[in-house]
Image (cartoon, rainbow, N blue to C red):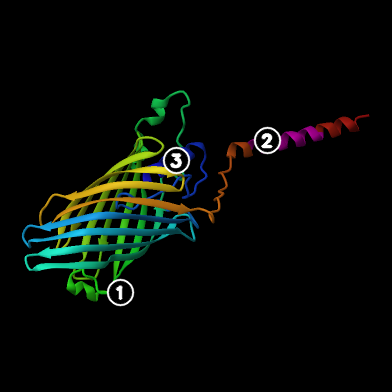
Amino acid sequence: MKLKFVTILIALFCIENNYAQHTDVINSNRPGESFSAFAVGKKVLQVESGINYLNDKHSILDYTANGFGVDFVTRYGFFKEELEALLEINYQNDTYKTDLGSIGRTGVKSATLGAKYLVYDPYKNRKDKVDIYSWKANHRFKWNSLIPAVAVYAGANLNFSDNPFLPSTDKLDVISPKVMVVTQNQFAGGYVFVTNIFADRISTNYQTMEYVITLTKGFNEQWSGFIENKGIQSDYYADLIFRTGAAYLLSDNLQLDASISKNLKDTPSIFYCGIGISWRNTENYEDVVLKAPKDKSSKKKSKKDKEKEKTKKRLDEVELTKP
């Protein structure tokens, strides 16, 4: 979970400057929709999936859609610690009802392949001092926590088959780009704030600008909760969706979650609720070993010691040569 990941990350930086994306516990984007700024780690495979109950109603068009959806995300770290590839697939099966009758719809609602790269990490070169005598001093607000980690994402929406969930003209766009900027802050008290701002279905007639903001809070070593807001704006659809839920850490590599989602309008009215799971495989991960910065003071001391040894050696030679 995002909170657990960053908390442990910060704790490690309090001890030393050695750094890697991989963490002791799983770093999952679930149960929210926002992307974390951090990657899973080089050669780490992670799967995040969930099933949701769906209920949509439109007061003007007078339709209802009830069914379920399955979200499936695969993340894999490659080439560098800060880089990961993501494959997102959303499958939906529902019954669409109007006054004229009902039809069953099923298919892949969306499929996106992309990559995310951490371009700036404020914690990498920052060493926070730990006061072993004061819990309050270690948990007070730090102004440097306002500086976020920043990542960028680029991907492509894939639409290779007839999609009953997309507008008819959009079915002609087999591939459309998606780009995103991700920021992430760690605050005192176990809070993590994540922001995603992105443009989706670029170059199509249904291009959208969207954002997702997520605030996560850790309650203990296993439990965390979150609240989230997603905004969507385009020429054909605009909405604000609110989401809340919780996650439970079963083990270092396994997380369970549950969430509910609701918007505030009735054109359409949206309600989702679901459960999910996140799992990772770290068998191929290799620890990243970074050289600690050289201690200039110790270097100066060693030079002084060498000079003393040389001086002492010369004095000893003089003493030995005296008659």
Q: Residue at x 22, y 59 (%)?
A: 67
Can residue 182 be spotted in the picture?
A: yes
Q: Residue at x 46, y 38 (%)?
A: 11
Chief secondary structure of the magenta portion: helix
Task: Name which quarter of the figure residue 49 lies in.
Answer: bottom left
- Disc 1 packing (10 Å; few <14; some 14–19; many ≥20): few
Identify the secondary structure beneath mark 1. loop
Q: Is residue 38 magenta?
A: no
Task: Name which quarter of the figure residue 293 lies in.
Answer: top right
- Disc 3 packing (10 Å; few <14; some 14–19; many ≥20): some
Identify the secondary structure beneath mark 3. helix
Mark closer to the chain start, 3 or 2? 3
Q: CA distance from mark 1 to mark 2?
A: 71 Å
- Disc 2 packing (10 Å; few <14; some 14–19; many ≥20): few
Residue linked to disc 2? 304
Percent position of residue 84, x then y: 43, 58
| Residue type pointed to by label 1 | Phe
Q: CA distance from mark 3 to mark 2?
A: 40 Å
| Residue type pointed to by label 3 | Ile
Which is more toward the observer, 139 or 64?
Answer: 64
Which is more toward the observer, 41 or 291?
Answer: 41
| Residue depth check, mark 1 versus mark 2: number of the one nearer the observer | 1
Task: Point out which mark residue 160 bears.
Answer: 1
Residue linked to disc 3? 8
| Residue type pointed to by label 2 | Lys
Mark closer to the chain start, 1 or 2? 1
Q: Residue furthest right?
A: 323
Start-end of magenta stretch: 300-314
